Amino acid sequence: MTQTPPQSLRNHGRYVPLYHFVLAALLVVNFVFTLARALRQHTSESLFALAVAVSLMILFFYARQFALIVQDRVIRLEMRLRMQQVLPADLFARFGELTPAQLVALRFAGDTELPDLTRRVLGGQLTSGGEIKRQIRDWQADWLRA
């Protein structure tokens, strides 16, 4: 049985090889092929094939975006509940000031360091998700991400 390495800043990104690499490559090749054919032959069939190729590229992009939007909403709810338990009342009262990207980054912080990191984010010392994630010492793995 293979053991999964601990999750960290370096390896927390999620890629699904068949989706991100194989399907993406096939869609790009299909688009290039149908575009070349449509430029050579201005038939209704080649233009329709190009429209389908473009539609598939749009579908590929938005299928991922919609899943990430739903995931971010779930993380926002998760963090609201978690922060309500972990943060002091005065700090939790400012929950609405945190951006979705900041909440996603703070999600990886352990409970003991979450109040300090949140205070630094709200104080403007840490702004981007990358900055926040680099400050996390007690990384909380999330293997169920989309």
Image (cartoon, rainbow, N blue to C red):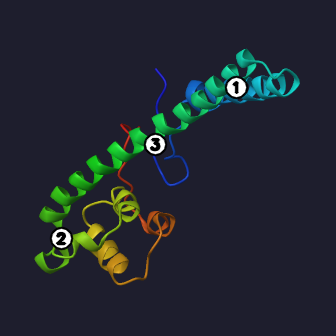
128 and 3: which is toward the camera = 128
Which of the two residues, 76 or 85, is positioned nearer the viewer here? 76
Residue corresponding to mark 2: 87
Are circles 2 and 3 on residues that touch, CB within 8 Å?
A: no
- What percent of the width, then of the height, locates residue 141? 38, 47
Residue depicted at 44% across the width and 68% down the height: 132
Rounded to the nearest whole Å, what is the CA distance between mark 1 and mark 2?
Answer: 53 Å
- The residue lying at 40 percent from left, 82 percent from top is 124
Q: Measure the alpha-carbon separation of dots 3 and 1.
A: 23 Å
Residue at which label 1 appears: 50
Q: Is residue 128 above or below residue 14?
A: below
Q: Are marks 3 and 1 in contact (CB under 8 Å)?
A: no
- What residue sits right under mark 3 in the picture? 65
| Whole-number angstrom distance, CA of label 2 to CA of label 3 | 31 Å
Query: In the figure, 93 relative to 105: above or below?
Result: below
The answer to which image quadrant residue 68 occupies is: top left
- Three-letter amino acid code at the position of disc 1: Leu
Q: Quadrant of residue 52?
A: top right
What crowding class fits label 2: few (fewer than 14 Cα within 10 Å), some (14-19), or many (20 or more)? some
